[in-house]
Image (cartoon, helix red, strand yellow):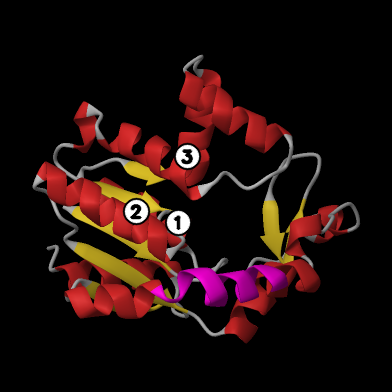
């Protein structure tokens, strides 16, 4: 089964993608993992990606698409995959469709995790990192034990300002994929406000996975 995970930052796409890939027996493919893999090899493509990342620049669509296509051509993707973090734009989605159609393996489903903006802000801004252990807590949903509370820090990308900037970018660039995939009949809407276990169950039901 070939599945794309879609939803705003902080909706739980990564967590659910790992669970779903495990149930389906297919690889979980995230853009972060693909970029790390690309920058570790010495190919011209990897060197181009590395140059953008080292400068703190966004990797252009055409390079991102090449990285994804190279990964999807690997043998472990023949039975399917769960894509997490790609596509992010309409151009990327159209490129993915063209590539999969050439392979004769179109997408089976696009899972949209629906979470309101204000809940996303609460989820992200409430996160705290223990710099000694790397453990991440949440002030409301997963409170830290009292003995470590004083040393916890908020990561710079977990501030409200950064969170709202990322949400605006999502609404502007990625949300147009919702009607795009809905027209294709592959969109599956799932309530992302439930517990992680309930969300996983709803995804499996939406995909018809027993």
Displayed quadrant of residue 62:
top left
Q: Quadrant of residue 167?
A: bottom right
Residue 15: image tag: 1
Q: In the image, which is nearer the foreground, mark 3 or mark 1?
A: 3
Q: What residue do we see at 44% from left, 61% from top? A: 13
Q: Which mark is residue 19?
A: 2
Look at the numbered disc 3 and give the secondary structure of its residue: helix
Of 169 and 36, the residue lying toward us: 169
Location of the C terminus by quadrant is: bottom left
Q: In whole angstroms, how far apart are the C-alphas of marks 2 and 1?
A: 7 Å
Task: State which mark lies toward you, 2 or 3.
Answer: 3
Count residues near mark 3 (Cα–Cα under 10 Å), then give few for <14, some for 14-19, many for 20+: some
The reply, left or right, for residue 23 in relation to residue 191 is: left
Asked if disc 2 and disc 1 are in contact, CB closer than 8 Å, the reply is yes
Location of residue 154 with respect to 170 vertically, above or below: above
Question: Which one is nearer the viewer's eye here, 92 or 120?
Answer: 92
- N-terminal label among 3 and 1: 1
**Vertical position of residue 129 compared to residue 127: above or below:** above
What residue is shown with label 3?
A: 63
Reply yes or no: does residue 167 show up in magenta.
yes
Give the magenta range: 165-176
Count of numbered labels shown in the rendering: 3
User: Closer to the camera, 44 or 171?
Assistant: 44
Packing grade of label 1 (10 A; few <14, some 14-19, many >=20) is few
């Amino acid at each position: 089964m070939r599945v794309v995970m879609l939803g705003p930052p902080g909706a739980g796409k990564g967590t659910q993608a790992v669970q779903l890939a495990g149930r389906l027996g297919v690889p979980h493919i995230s853009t972060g993992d693909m970029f790390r893999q690309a920058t570790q090899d010495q190919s011209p493509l990897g060197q181009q990606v590395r140059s953008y990342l080292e400068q703190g620049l966004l990797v252009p669509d055409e390079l991102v698409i090449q990285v994804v296509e190279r990964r999807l051509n690997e043998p472990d993707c023949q039975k399917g995959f769960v894509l997490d973090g790609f596509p992010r734009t309409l151009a990327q989605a159209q490129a993915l469709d063209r590539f999969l159609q050439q392979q004769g393996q179109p997408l089976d489903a696009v899972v949209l995790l629906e979470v309101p903006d204000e809940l996303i802000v609460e989820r992200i801004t409430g996160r705290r990192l223990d710099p000694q252990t790397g453990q991440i807590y949440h002030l409301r949903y997963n409170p830290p034990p009292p003995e470590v509370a004083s040393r916890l820090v908020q990561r710079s990308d977990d501030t409200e300002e950064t969170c709202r900037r990322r949400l605006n970018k999502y609404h502007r660039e990625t949300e147009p994929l919702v009607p795009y995939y809905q027209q294709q009949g592959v969109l599956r809407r799932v309530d992302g406000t439930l517990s992680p276990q309930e969300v996983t169950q709803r995804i499996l039901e939406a995909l018809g996975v027993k």
